[in-house]
Image (cartoon, grey):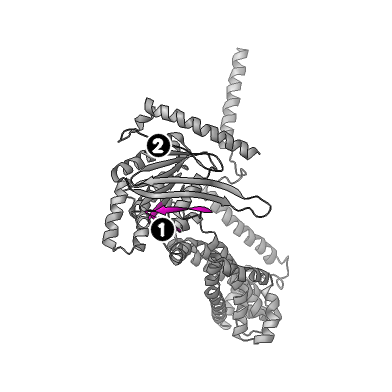
Amino acid sequence: MQRNKTLNMDTVIVEESIKKKKKKPRYFEPQKPIPKSLYFKLTMSSFILLLGIWSLLTYTNIVDPLFLPTPTSIITSGITLFTQFNFINDIFVTCYRVFLGFGLALLIGIPLGIFMGTYKVVEAFFEPIISFVRYMPVSAFIPLFILWIGVGELEKVSVIFFGSVFSIVLMVAVEVSGVRRELLEAAYTLGSSNVGVLRSVILPASMPGILDAIRLVLGWAWSYIVVAELIATASGIGSVIIESQRMFRIGNIIFGILTIGMLGLLSDVILKSIGKKMFSWNYGR
Amino acid sequence: MELLVNVKDVKKVYGGNGKKPDVLAVDTINLKIMRNEFITILGPSGCGKSTLLRMIGGLEEQTEGTIYLQGGEIIGPSANRGMVFQAYSLFPWLNIEENIQYGLKIKGMDSKERKEITNRYIELVGLQGFEHHYPKQLSGGMQQRVAIARALANDPEILLLDEPFGALDNQTRLIMQELLLEIWEKTHKTILFITHDVEEAIFLGSRVITMTSRPGKIKADIPINLAYPRSYKIKTEKEFLVLKEQLTELIRGESLRAMELEIK
């Protein structure tokens, strides 16, 4: 009887431990996937938490609204900006500068990067100097640009252009020179010429990587534009921000920052979806 | 028999850079490849067998000697020598059909003719229904079938295969060997095939050439007189096993020597 009882207890303990093993989730096993619903909940809760802390600090007046306004007053600031201060125009001006400067950077940077990644003679000539220039901060050049070309549109576009072009060149060159040797050799043994290999192998093979480089550098361009517009400018999101600082309209500053963030996110999402459509061969099975 | 490829006194030296001494990778190779032969080159790893194949393909330049194709000297790669690599040489942005048509387009063939040839070779390697798939969607074995079809569609004088089944699992490899042999029995395309696998070399080849470890020289040139069509069952027959034993002995000695060289 006694023995029987202990045996029973043992089985119970064993069963429990099995249950425990099955149930116990292992969220901290490195790189282990988690359920999609949990992923989504965690993502949402981080936003809610941020909004919650912000609301707590502002609605209760723990923080002076002069320094950090409430979420609702930020929204009202935004509405006033659009309805009374023609903020949409500032958005257009900023976008125009970014797209013009960045577009020119792509126009020069992509072909140069492709040639640098393909031909060692081009690489030897450009690579060292560009690697050096790239580390000079473009924001520090703004006073010089103003001195050389004034405070007009050209100066803003130049900041974007010079801020982006060197990185584009180098990143494209790395992408292009990383095309698998086997692909080139296969093309040659199928009868392709040197130019043919560049056109029909190197270009298509490096396109997805080039698009990734564009996405990355475009992100930086959005922050350069604000730096450029902070100085001596009458229009653009950056100028709205600096103007609002003078008037102590903190809500406007935060709304301006959020707008830039949204624009950056939007442009990235668009580029990413274009890439997925154009280079479907490169994604997944 | 017509002499197709003639390798004459070919040497390959990899240049050292001051600190490292020059390395003699391939030493005075003489080899005559006749039309319609299926030659397998068997050698221990690092013996220079791939280097020899790549020199015939024109992807590497020999330091000394000359290689002739139908009497003309080989300078650089060309469509008359098709090549299949160990893995991942399909163009991932082209679907299977477009991959096979790559060389045909360069030749300036019209689309109707291209389509005809593509269909023929897709059928030959048994990939009907996969014409519009992308390489990523295929298994390793299927990708190599496409690579073989792509090289064959170009109708080269000789097909050069550089351990094409080396990255495949064993079961797939055996099936691919049968497929390649079947293709050769049908087309009698001249084939030069590199491998380090004794069984593969005997099963496929009409002639097996063994190489010494570095510097790679030709050690033996053995005709394989096993009847065609060969089925996989031949691998357990006495004739086959005798050859296998003989070649294993030859290669084993060289592999041991190669390992000693590495240790030094």
Q: Which residue is mark 1?
A: B78
| Camera-nearest residue between A5 and A139 | A139
Image location (x, y in percent) of residue A227: 66, 76
Horizontal side of B262 relative to B109 (left or right) equals: right
Chain letter for mark 1 = B
Chain part drawn in magenta: B63-82
Image vertical order of residue B22 relative to residue A24, above or below: below
- Against A186, residue A122 (above or below) is below
Q: Quadrant of the C terminus of chain B?
A: top right
Image quarter hosting the N terminus of chain B: top left
On whether disc 2 and disc 1 are found on a single subunit, the reply is: yes
**Residue B174 bears which disc, if any?**
2
Left or right, A89 with respect to A249, comes to left
- Label 2: state its secondary structure: helix
Q: Position of residue B114 (x, y in %)?
A: 30, 59
Q: Chain of mark 2?
A: B
Q: Position of residue A258 (x, y in %)?
A: 60, 70
